[in-house]
Amino acid sequence: MDFSLFYFANNDTEERDRYRLLLDGARFADDNGFTAVWTPERHFHPFGGLYPNPAVTGAAVAAVTKRVAVRAGSVVAPLHHPMRIAEEWSVVDNLSGGRAGVALASGWHAADFALRPENYETRKSGLMETVETIRRLWRRESVPLTDGAGETVELTMFPPPVQPALPMWLTSGGTPATFTLAGEHGMGMLTHLLGQEVEVLAQRIEEYRRAHREHQPASAGPGHVAVMVHTFVGTDRDAVRETVREPFSRYLASSFDLLIKAAEAAGAQGADMSRELKSMGPEDRQFLVAQAFDRYFETSGMFGTVDDCMAMLKQLKDAGVDEVACLVDFGVPTDEVIGGFEHLARLHDTWRAHLGS
């Protein structure tokens, strides 16, 4: 089971050097045997707002590293023309010497689709068509497009990529159909523990593996599952709890209006949830955040000492996870996160030794 770094910052600070943690973390990952650095795509909100374009941040990561994979977690496919996705990530592939990878998502936040409102209603149905177009372009095939004069033209992507195939994942918060879809199409799976317990995740992974076996050749292997996990490692569990309590609680609270928007986007299915969240007063929200913090700290994150985190890693390994993507930028001050990297490196090395024992 591999380790990587994942970024999804809550940009609510006035720091001028906002990308220091990204770049210092990338160098750390590169030097300490980590597999990848993931950056997301987010728009119009401080929650994740440092990352409106993962190809741009990925290019920066590529420039300061030599070995680690450079990945999008995730590109919101309906917001972009497939040609643009392929072009941008071919640039990253060239800058990195063949280390690019992309997770794709259909998107869920209606406000994001201010960029391409015409694609909101069909955001799910067109996702796999985008995947197949990117694959064709990456193989240097031409695709038919309509030019400014209304003529159909056959166009090929430039620059040529380094890798013969672009590693691709689908992103899901736990929807079973998405796990199955990723397996059927020979893609990896990028998911998280926000709203799904490890036991449920294990069931979803088995469904993914089954679909992968049934639809892909044996030479394709069993597929790949990466799980994003909020992470902070230290030498004392209680001290770690107090270090992360306030910033992680603030991080959870900042996502409230996103949850409301998600519920509204679900239509009648999410109407009750939307009304309930909107009706909550400050004290009720504070109570809900406190409960969420306790649950995540105990069951859904990698918080505490190396020994504490080893227990979570063993659970994830047993569930069938291939890669743990450590989300490190949830609000702890940058210097403290960077200072804790030595303990994260020790966790990585301890896990490697455990696998070899």
Image: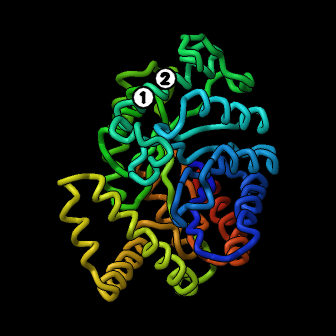
What x and y, as percent, mark residue 197?
34, 60
**Residue 357 in sight:** no
Give the residue type that dot 2 points to.
Glu
Give the residue type that dot 1 points to.
Met
Q: Secondary structure at mark 1?
A: helix
Mark number displayed over residue 209: none
Image position of 300 (left or right of 91): left
What x and y, as percent, mark residue 128?
42, 28
Up the image or down, 232 lies above or below 129; here it is: below
* Image mark count: 2
Identified at 38% across, 79% down, the residue is: 289
Which residue matches tag 1? 128
Which of the pair 153/99 is nearer the observer?
Answer: 153
Residue neighbourhood size for the residue with mark 1, other residues' Cα within 10 Å, grouped as few (<14), some (14–19), many (≥20): some
Which of the pair 119/209 is nearer the observer?
Answer: 119
Image position of 274 (left or right of 17): left
Residue neighbourhood size for the residue with mark 2, other residues' Cα within 10 Å, grouped as few (<14), some (14–19), many (≥20): few
What x and y, as percent, mark residue 159?
74, 25
What x and y, as percent, mark residue 262?
34, 57
Identified at 55% across, 48% down, the residue is: 73
Which residue matches tag 2? 132
Up the image or down, 307 lies above or below 118; here it is: below
Identified at 60% across, 59% down, the residue is: 7
